[in-house]
Image (cartoon, grey):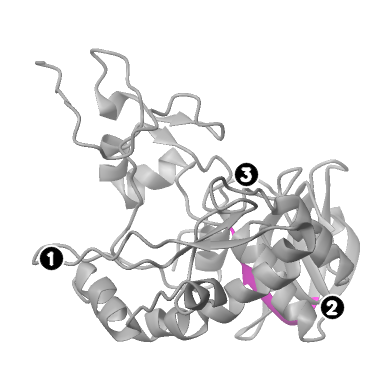
Amino acid sequence: MTEKYNVDNYHYTPADVKKTIETDVLVVGAGNAGMMAAASAAENGAKVTIIEKEASINLMRVGLAAVGTNAQKAAGITINKYDLVEHLAAFAQHNVDESLLYEWADNSAEAINWVEDNVLKPHGAHLRPESDAMVTGSAYKGFPTENDPTFDDKSFASYGQWFEEKVRDMGVNLIFKTALVELIKDGDIVTGVIAKDLDADEFVEYKVAKGVILCTGGYLANEELLAKWNPLSLKKNVYNDSPRSNGAGITTALNIGAIKDEQPAETIFDRGLVPVGTKTEDMFVHTATYDDWLWLGSHPLLKVNLRG
């Protein structure tokens, strides 16, 4: 690969690196994936550090997909994982590594049970299993994989602060306002990271004994990368609800030889409100608050084009 990416325009020399921190495992990104990865590594005895470029952890998802959780078993919900994996693979026209789908199907219950037992229940909350998605027909299949944190089985419980307290109690060092700049390799092995302390405006080297885990999300907040890698998304989407996801994890990995999927993917919700007369390709708003979302999901209401 000849092109080098620097999505945040951070430039440094060795003399700019003012501090070195050693850790066993470095997790980049403090969302669901990063917090879960850090908890798992710490539980297995590693010294773990998380760096997050924002001032807080990311939104922790309230719909947690898994197969065979304790909550599902208690509710009598059974999911055939073989049918589910086949459905997901077929949905992707089998352009997917099915072993990764089975990795999730085989192990997701353990992870979600851990969240319920160690994060939710100590605070009086639990998981409510989704029970109304078992829709089967000639054109569509649904699988009730969702598990929702709740106190009362009616509303959703926010558990991000509880999760943060839990990983800190496990000895995880959680460092905010610190952005990924570059991955460091020794031969074919990633041995460290250069990051920028945004408050101190200085660069830090993290020396890593066991591995770096990138949990930085996609690149929906980076319109330049979207235009290059997935231009149709700019034409079809009008709101981006992931303003943290600028592609830094992906690009730093590409810079040291990682391979990116040739076929892009995206998740679209048809909930964005667009002013009358506006073309979707002329509008792409970054928001983390959903102020301009119409919370009607995909109900069969009347939808019109610019001609009415």
Q: Which residues are magenta?
A: 208-216
Placement of 3 over or under 208, stated as above or below: above
First in sequence: mark 2 or mark 3?
Answer: 3
CA gap between label 1 and label 3 equals 50 Å
Please report the residue visible at 64 percent of the width from the left and 86 percent of the height from the top. 187
Q: Residue 66 appears at what percent x and percent y?
A: 47, 72
Q: As rendered, which of 24 and 138 lies closer to the eye?
A: 138
**Labels 2, 1: front one:** 1
Q: As rendered, which of 113 and 237 lies closer to the eye?
A: 113
Q: Which residue is mark 3?
A: 9
CA gap between label 2 and label 1 equals 49 Å
Q: Amino acid at mark 2?
A: Lys
Q: As rendered, which of 15 and 241 lies closer to the eye?
A: 241
Q: Residue 132 appears at what percent x and percent y?
A: 34, 59
Placement of 68 over or under 140, stated as above or below: below
Please report the residue visible at 87 percent of the width from the left and 74 percent of the height from the top. 22
CA gap between label 2 and label 3 equals 30 Å
Q: Amino acid at mark 1?
A: Gly
Which mark, by number, is residue 47? 2
Q: Residue 245 appears at what percent x and percent y?
A: 54, 48
SS label for mark 3: loop
Residue lying furthest top = 276
SS label for mark 2: loop
Please tell me whether residue 144 belongs to the stretch shown in magenta.
no
Q: Which residue is mark 1?
A: 137
First in sequence: mark 2 or mark 1?
Answer: 2
Please report the residue visible at 27 percent of the width from the left and 29 percent of the height from the top. 281
Placement of 277 over or under 304, stated as above or below: above
Which mark, by number, is residue 274? none
Q: Are marks 2 and 1 in contact (CB under 8 Å)?
A: no
Placement of 50 over or under 225, stated as above or below: below
